[in-house]
Image (cartoon, rainbow, N blue to C red):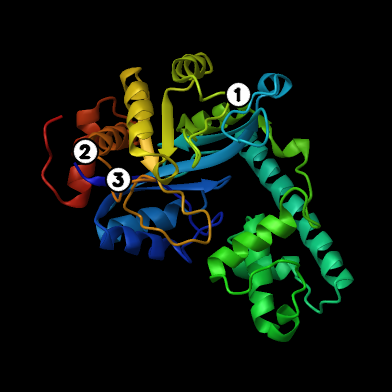
Amino acid sequence: MLDVNAHIHTPYSFSAFSSVDQALEHAQEEGVRVVGINDFYSTDGYKAWKEGCTERRLYPLFGIELISLNEEDQAAGLRVNDPNNPGRTYISGKGLAYPVRLSGPPLKQLEAVRAHSNAQVEMMCGKLNAWLQEQGSPIRLDFRQIKETLTMGHIRERHLAKALRLAMERCPVVAGHGIIPGLNRNLSPAKLENELRSKLLKAGGPAFVPESPEAFLPMKTVQEIIEAAGGIPSYPFLADDAKGNFTDFEGDLMWAADTLKKRGFRSVEFITTRNTTAVLEQYAGYLEDEGFIVSFGSEHNTPEMEPVKLRTRDAAELSPRLKAIGWRGACAIAAHQAGKDSLAAGEELIMRSVGLPGIPG
C-alpha cells in the first residue's frame, strides 16, 4: 500500500500552498505517492497537477468541491455537513475525466455559481473598505488587484483576510493602534488571517455579506455536473468534532448511509485531522462494508501549513486499517478515471505510474 492524500486544495481555489508545485514537492518529500487535487468550483489546476505528478512519479487523482442546497433538509432544520447552515451540503467529485470534458449546460451552471461567489466577495471587499474608513484607517483593499495577484481567478473570503494581513504589515503604525478591537497582533501570519476572517468577514462581522441563493445549486444538480465531468459524487463527512459532537445528519451512521444511497451517493470522504482514530475507523469501516468508496484527505484550504501525509486528530499517522481503506478507495478512483471497473486495475495503474511493480488485487 502507498500513502494517499485524495483531497488537496491548490491556489486555484485557496490553499496553504503557494503553487501546485509546492504542494507536490511536499507530497514527494513526505512519501505520499497518490495525490488528489480537489479545488472549489474549479478544474483549472488539472493540467499543472498532471504534469507535476508525472515529473515526480506521483499518481494524480482529479476532484472538485461544490456547495449544494437540499431544500427538504433546510426546511426540516437538518444540519448535514455544514454545522451552521441547515440543508447546505458540501459535495466533492472524485475521479473526474482528464483532459477535462465538462461543457454545455453543466459548464455554464458551474461558471454561474463561481461568478456569484466572486460577486459576494467583491461586496465584502467594499463593506470592509467602508468599515476601515470608519475606523480612521488609511488601508484600502483593491478587489481587482487581489484577484490578479493572490488568486488564480476564483476569489474567496480567505483571500481578503490575507490581503488585509499583508496591508497591515505594510502599515505597522496604524496596525499597532489596534484598528480591530481585541485583535492579538502577536499571532502567526496564518492565525492572524484566521482571526481577521472570523472577526470581520464571518456572520456578525462588519464586512459580512450573506451568500445569494443563486450561489447554491440543488444537490441533484451538483451531482449531475460531477457526473457530466466523468466523476463520482462523493459526500464529505464531518464526523466527530473537537467536542465529540456530530451533525444531525451524521449522528446516526446507519441512517446516514441509507439516506446517502437513496440520494445516489456511492462514495464518501473524510478530512482525517478532524476526527479521532476510533470514530474514523468506525465510520469509514462501516461505510466501506456498505459498498461506498471511501477516501481520505487533508484539504489544506486554510493558511496553516500542515503535513500532506495524513494523520488523525489524536494520532501522528493513520492506523493500518485506515491506510488500507484509503488505499482501496484510491485504487477504485484510479480505476474509474481510467474507465476500468476493478480495484486490481486501479492498483496496477497506480503502481506502474509511480514506477513500482504491480501487486495482485
- Taking the image as shown, residue 293 lies to the left or right of residue 181, namely left
**Label 2 or label 1, whichever comes before in sequence order:** 1
**Can you identify the residue that label 3 sits on?**
4
Where in the figure is residue 332, as x and y percent of width and height?
A: 30, 31
Single out the residue that lies furthest toward the right.
Answer: 134
**Label 2 or label 3, whichever comes before in sequence order:** 3
As helix, strand or loop, the secondary structure at mark 1 comes to: helix
For label 1, count other residues whose C-alpha is less than 10 Å away and answer few (under 14), some (14-19) or many (20+).
some
Q: Quadrant of the C terminus?
A: top left
Instruction: Tell me the tag on residue 320.
Output: 2
Location of residue 350 with respect to 336 vertically, above or below = below
- Taking the image as shown, residue 312 lies to the left or right of residue 119, namely left
As helix, strand or loop, the secondary structure at mark 2 comes to: helix
* Disc 2 to disc 3, C-alpha distance: 13 Å
**Label 1 or label 3, whichever comes before in sequence order:** 3
Q: Nearer the viewer, residue 239 or 113?
A: 239
Q: Nearer the viewer, residue 182 or 305?
A: 182
Going by the numbered disc 1, the residue's amino acid type is Lys
| Residue 188 in view of the camera | yes
Residue 325, quarter of the rendered image: top left
- Taking the image as shown, residue 294 lies to the left or right of residue 86, namely left
**Can you identify the residue that label 1 sits on?**
220
Residue at image point 71% right, 83% down = 171
Residue at image point 66% right, 21% down = 73
| Residue 96 in view of the camera | no
Judged by depth in the image, the label closer to the viewer, 2 or 1, is 2
Judged by depth in the image, the label closer to the viewer, 2 or 3, is 2
Residue 24, quarter of the rendered image: bottom left
- Taking the image as shown, residue 21 lies to the left or right of residue 76, namely left
